[in-house]
Image: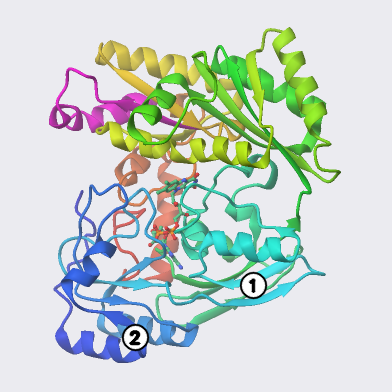
Amino acid sequence: MAKLSSTPRTPVLPTVIDRLKAAAGEGGYLDKPEDIAPYTKSWRGNWQGASPLFLRPRTTGEMAAVVRICAETGTAIVPQGGNTGLTYGGQPGTGMNEVIVSTARMKAIREIDLKNDTITVEAGVVLQEIQRQAAEVNRLFPLSLGAEGTCQIGGNISTNAGGIQVLRYGNTRSLVLGLEVVLPDGQIWDGLRGLRKDNTGYDLKQLFIGGEGTLGIITAAVLKLFPRPSETQSAWVAVGTPDDAVALLGLMRQELGESVSSFELISRPTVELLLAGVPGSSDPMPVAYPWYVLTEVSGQGEPGSLAEPLSLVLGLAVEKGIAQDAVLAASGEQARKLWKLREDLPFGVQAAGGAVPHDVSVPLSRITEFIRRADAAMLKAYPSSRFCCFGHVGDGNLHYNPVRPADWTFDQWNAEREAINKIVHDIVVELGGSISAEHGIGVVRREENLRYKSPVEIDLMTRIKRVLDPSNIMNPGKVIPL
Ligand SMILES: Cc1cc2nc3c(=O)[nH]c(=O)nc-3n(C[C@H](O)[C@H](O)[C@H](O)COP(=O)(O)OP(=O)(O)OC[C@H]3O[C@@H](n4cnc5c(N)ncnc54)[C@H](O)[C@@H]3O)c2cc1C
């Protein structure tokens, strides 16, 4: 990992550690290296930092007391939720000079307001639990992603997470109405407003959404709830090219409107990695096709009422030559299997070892051009390149992963990471895209972000960070190299 922060720091003093332990309250810390170790490791296992103390306050007051001590003593903080982030944003460096501050014990559902269609939750509530709480009162909280059984809403908000329902409901930013945040000086900002209209000056919450813990620790949020669909249908569709997938999306939206809630693109090599690397997975179709779409439509109506409209549109797509074959999930159980397959794709890629992951977005109209140009540029530089590509194509978001060629060693391929990133990201930026669609910057994309963002944007971001966190204690070195 690149050097984390340019602010000089010494290891945290034992006197400071004692004060922090006292402030975190009963059961509010871990201080044994073996207990802390899992929280200093990245999800992909390729970064292991170190910290002398893992703090887990239970209340906003305890959180503020912890942060005040850190501010007073210049102690750096790494905020952490479920630790499923993919950019090393939630791990410390190796200098034993940062404490991890976790929201894991802040788990209260503070309020469900059905008339306002909002739920107010503390930052440590696991995403799946919020979905469950919403379902219990016949509502939908639409944020949904592979790590939903582990990631926490504070982490989701801090990374502005995307997932599989952005097409219809927007990303996390569009689901948050209000926030409570402990600022780097230990003050509590109470912005827990459940308003859909509020034009009283700068919209401060937007700074913390996607802020990756560099500007403060989110302790609670007011989130939007939606009517819970009574009818959902999923289909696995074979297509010849990514262009056909984009055409299919256009056709489905024209015919089925807003009911199209998810639309995922998956390449055949990605399915093959899944079949090889994830025990128990099976191919949804007996014949192999170059690309697949996994789509979901949902809405209000009698159970089964969307099956006919969906199958008519897919039939039309086959007639027009846009789709080659399609399977409609015949039951809820079959639909769950198809979506489990989609969730497991990252595990297949991980099992293959040595993929160079990219999380990019381009305008939908340029998806095909991106894949064509990136494949060609990679093959020119590395003639035995293999690719696995999948993603939330309805949002223009692709996970484009050049996989280690069979004739390369892990170390050889790993040494090419920077060069591969440059090949892929230069094309993304030329096409008007983003080098991080939903995973954030953390440390992994920090230097590249500096290369691609305009100096004006980097200067503004740096100035905002300096105003809110003048001592640079809040997740130093993440997003911006300060
Ligand atoms: C299998 C798998 C599938 C995934 N799929 C998706 C996907 O489809 N879409 C997507 O967007 N992401 C995806 N991710 C990435 C990850 O799950 C998300 O980034 C998630 O939002 C992180 O939440 P977390 O609680 O684990 O945060 P962490 O990993 O703990 O932290 C992430 C960042 O947020 C900061 N942070 C955490 N909590 C707070 C807080 N309360 N206040 C301030 N800062 C905080 C941390 O310092 C860090 O910078 C996936 C990850 C995995 C492992």
User: Alpha carbon of mark 1 to alpha carbon of mark 2: how far?
Assistant: 25 Å
Q: Is residue 395 above or below residue 444?
A: above
Q: Nearer the viewer, residue 442 or 350?
A: 350
Is the CB of mark 2 within 8 Å of ligand 1?
no
Is the CB of mark 1 within 8 Å of ligand 1?
no
Which of the two discs, 1 and 2, labels the residue nearer the N terminus?
A: 2
Q: Nearer the viewer, residue 375 or 445?
A: 375
- Total number of numbered discs in the rendering: 2
Type of amino acid at the residue the image marks with label 2: Gly
Quarter holding residue 215: bottom left
Assign ligand 1 to one image quadrant: bottom left
User: What residue is rendered at 76% in x and 23% in y?
Assistant: 311
Label disc, if present, on residue 109 of the rendered structure: none
Label 2 SS: loop
Quarter holding residue 328: top right
Q: In this figure, which residue is indicated by the disc labeled 1?
A: 120
Q: Is residue 302 above or below residue 28?
A: above
Q: Position of residue 316 (x, y in %)?
A: 77, 14
User: What residue is rendered at 15% in x and 85% in y?
Assistant: 14
Label 1 SS: strand
Q: In this figure, which residue is indicated by the disc labeled 2?
A: 27
Residue range of the region highlighted in magenta in the rendering: 398-426
Quarter holding residue 54: bottom left
